[in-house]
Image (tube, rainbow, N blue to C red):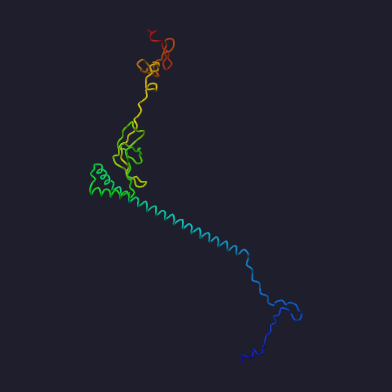
Amino acid sequence: MSSEPFEEQGPVIRDKRRIDPVTGEVREPREAAAPSPAAPPEAPAAAESEVEQTLAERTADLQRLQAEYVNYKRRVDRDREATRQTAIASVLTALLPVLDDIDRAREHEELAGGFKAVAESLQRTVSALGLVPFGDVGDEFDPRIHEALMHGYSGDVAGPTCSAVLQVGYRLGDRIVRPARVAVVEPEAAPPVSGNGSGSFDASEPAARAGGPDGTQPAAAGPNEPRSGEGGEVRTAEGEERVDRTEAG
């Protein structure tokens, strides 16, 4: 029963010849493929612009994150180094009295034997940590690194100079751990200049400039003191005229 429809339909013949055998003309295709709708030309450009904008934003975000990380790393390294220097300075400051005792023992030639070896080892250790002593006789006085405990005058110096070092100073890098305590001398002051500026008195100056033969100056008259006028009269500050006492007598 299922084969009956196929027997009734019979074979199907399709003529696909491009040229008609009867007329000899070229046949038009019966079913032409529907053209696909063309995409608007603006779509690819818009999509490409959007992609470039997104890429630029992601690149800017990445650069900003990288810059923040670099700044953070530098700040952490700087803080770590500052903390390390502060800790070293604190320890070395506590050791300064020991170093002073070693210097005094060396000055008195009491640094010998095992004590000398220990002192030299300690000084090598603090030097390796960056502790540097400073302060010598003849250095120019600098209030930023010197502390003056004594003061004097000398004609052999041209400016404030350290004449003696009472206690050496120490620095750690750019930090002054302890200033050098010194005695300072300055040039002697020049003697005061008197007279006419050449250091000697000029006897030819008029006595009136000095005021009197003994060099005293006359006292100035007060506002109500009488002042001599012409014709034997005297005038007071109020403008009253009086006759000279000699004529009145």
Q: What residue occupies the far front of the structure in this picture? A: 113
* Quarter of the picture holding the N terminus: bottom right
**Total residue callouts:** 0
Spot occupied by residue 248 in the image (x, y as percentages of width and height): 39, 8
Q: Nearer the viewer, residue 157 or 37?
A: 157
Q: Quadrant of residue 8?
A: bottom right
Q: Which residue is pictured at 34% across the width and 36% down the height?
A: 161
Is 244 placed above or below 55 here? above
Q: Nearer the viewer, residue 120 or 55?
A: 120
* Quarter of the picture holding the C terminus: top left
Spot occupied by residue 118 in the image (x, y as percentages of width and height): 25, 50
Q: Nearer the viewer, residue 245 or 215?
A: 215
Spot occupied by residue 20 in the image (x, y as percentages of width and height): 74, 80
Q: Nearer the viewer, residue 50 or 62?
A: 62
Q: Which residue is pictured at 44% across the width and 56% down the height?
A: 70
Tell me, yes or no, if residue 91 can be seen here: no
Tell me, yes or no, if residue 244 can be seen here: yes
Viewed as shown, does residue 138 lie left or right of 9? left
Q: Which residue is pictured at 22% across the width and 48% down the height?
A: 113
Spot occupied by residue 170 in the image (x, y as percentages of width and height): 32, 45
Q: Quadrant of residue 109?
A: top left
Is 94 placed above or below 146 here? below
Q: What residue occupies the far bottom of the structure in this picture? A: 1
Viewed as shown, does residue 181 lie left or right of 49? left
Viewed as shown, does residue 42 lie left or right of 20? left
Is 34 placed above or below 164 here? below
Q: Quadrant of residue 234?
A: top left
Q: What residue occupies the far right of the structure in this picture? A: 23
